[in-house]
Image (tube, rainbow, N blue to C red):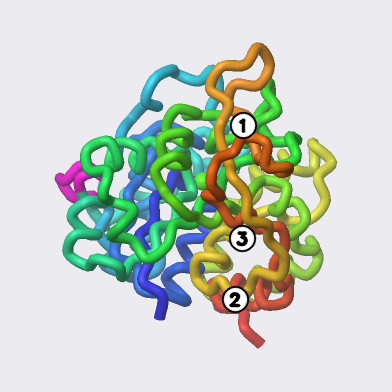
């Protein structure tokens, strides 16, 4: 089984990814970031999710703000004010530990050097802090998989051609992309190519167990938002990144390139720069995941919802 350490800002698609992780892998911990909504909400949502899967996964609260600049917007208009569709879940039983997320990331990777795949599903603030405290972190992880970036410049933030996780805290993404010699990048545009058919997805929600019931509830706000945006199908960015983390053999098309983040830019702060033509003279740091086997991705999601046939 894969051994995962997940940094997350739940978040509706984070929720699906966390369900997948607990169905297919061992999860060493959840470090929680601010992003989709504020930290108090994302931590509480992580606790709700751990109750749901009946696990004892440790939870660690991270940094409440980006490293440098407060962004103008979060993603409450997609995920709901509380980040999980404003369903109104009761106070969760699972508790977050006292340790700061960045310190927990360092400790857990020291305890299990070379074993853990780090899965980054949120703005990269916690990882950047951990790297500044201890630059040897990359040597201790088996792999890093990042959901982030918009490699053809479309993106999903409202004002800049950027992807949300990178656009929310560009400096942190910069620190992480510079520090890791090799990581898998699952970007927003790959996500759009790997949406699920609505009708099929609805069948899984009906066929599944309590996890499907839960997801059916939290998913309504995001679904309405996507309809408004005229996006077709069920888009779950973090779920796609999680599939790549759980089993990289699911990748069917990728390109090895140097990936960087624009930190200034009159129009482009937070944009992802993929050096497609190799002009920057910098070493490859990323495997840019372009496509995965959609059938296998779907099977992973079905199992996580308890809807396997
Ligand atoms: C990413 O941003 C968040 O809104 C999602 O949870 C995902 O991690 C997609 O751009
Ligand atoms: Ca996320």
Which of the two labelled residues, at mark 3 and mark 2, occupies the earlier sequence position? 3
Q: Is residue 102 magenta?
A: yes
Q: Secondary structure at mark 2?
A: helix
Quadrant showing the C terminus: bottom right
Q: Secondary structure at mark 1?
A: helix
The residue under label 3 is 240
Q: Residue at x 29, y 36 (%)?
A: 129
User: In x, y percent, where is residue 178?
Assistant: 44, 39
The nearer-to-camera label among 3 and 1 is 3
Q: Residue at x 84, y 41 (%)?
A: 230
Image side of residue 250 versus residue 119, left or right? right
Label 3–label 2 contact, CB within 8 A: no
Q: Secondary structure at mark 3?
A: helix
Q: Quadrant of residue 64?
A: top left
Q: In the image shown, does 137 or 2 lie closer to the viewer? A: 137
User: In x, y percent, where is residue 220?
Assistant: 65, 49
Quadrant showing the N terminus: bottom left
In the picture shown, does residue 92 fall above or below 298? above
The residue under label 1 is 77
Label 2–label 1 contact, CB within 8 A: no
Q: Residue at x 75, y 63 (%)?
A: 196
The residue under label 2 is 249
Which of the two labelled residues, at mark 2 and mark 1, occupies the earlier sequence position? 1
- The residues tagged by marks 3 and 2 sit, at their Cα atoms, a distance apart of 13 Å
The segment highlighted magenta reads 96-103
């Amino acid at each position: 089984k894969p051994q995962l350490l997940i940094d997350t800002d739940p978040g509706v698609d984070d929720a699906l990814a966390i369900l997948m992780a607990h169905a297919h892998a061992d999860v060493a911990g959840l470090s929680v970031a601010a992003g989709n909504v504020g930290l108090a909400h994302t931590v509480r949502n992580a606790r709700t999710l751990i109750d749901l899967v009946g696990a004892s996964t440790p939870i660690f609260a991270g940094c409440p703000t980006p490293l440098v600049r407060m962004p103008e917007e979060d993603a409450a208009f997609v995920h709901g004010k509380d980040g999980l569709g404003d369903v109104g879940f009761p106070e969760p039983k699972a508790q977050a530990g006292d340790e700061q997320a960045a310190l927990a990331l360092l400790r857990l990777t020291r305890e299990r050097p070379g074993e853990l795949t780090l899965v980054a599903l949120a703005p990269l603030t916690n990882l950047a802090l951990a790297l500044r405290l201890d630059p040897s972190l990359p040597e201790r992880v088996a792999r890093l998989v990042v959901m982030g970036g918009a490699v053809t410049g479309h993106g999903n933030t409202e004002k800049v051609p950027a992807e949300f996780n990178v656009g929310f805290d560009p400096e942190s993404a910069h620190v992480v992309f510079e520090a890791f010699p090799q990581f898998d990048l699952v970007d927003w545009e790959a996500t759009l190519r790997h949406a699920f058919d609505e009708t099929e997805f609805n069948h899984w929600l009906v066929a599944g167990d309590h996890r499907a019931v839960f997801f059916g509830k939290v998913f309504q706000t995001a679904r309405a938002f996507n309809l408004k945006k005229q996006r077709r199908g069920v888009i779950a960015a973090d779920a796609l990144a999680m599939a790549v983390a759980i089993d990289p053999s699911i990748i069917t098309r990728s390109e090895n390139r140097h990936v960087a983040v624009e930190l200034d830019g009159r129009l482009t702060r937070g944009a992802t720069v993929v050096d497609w033509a190799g002009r920057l003279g910098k070493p490859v740091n990323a495997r840019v995941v372009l496509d995965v086997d959609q059938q296998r991705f779907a099977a992973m999601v079905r199992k996580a919802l308890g809807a396997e046939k």
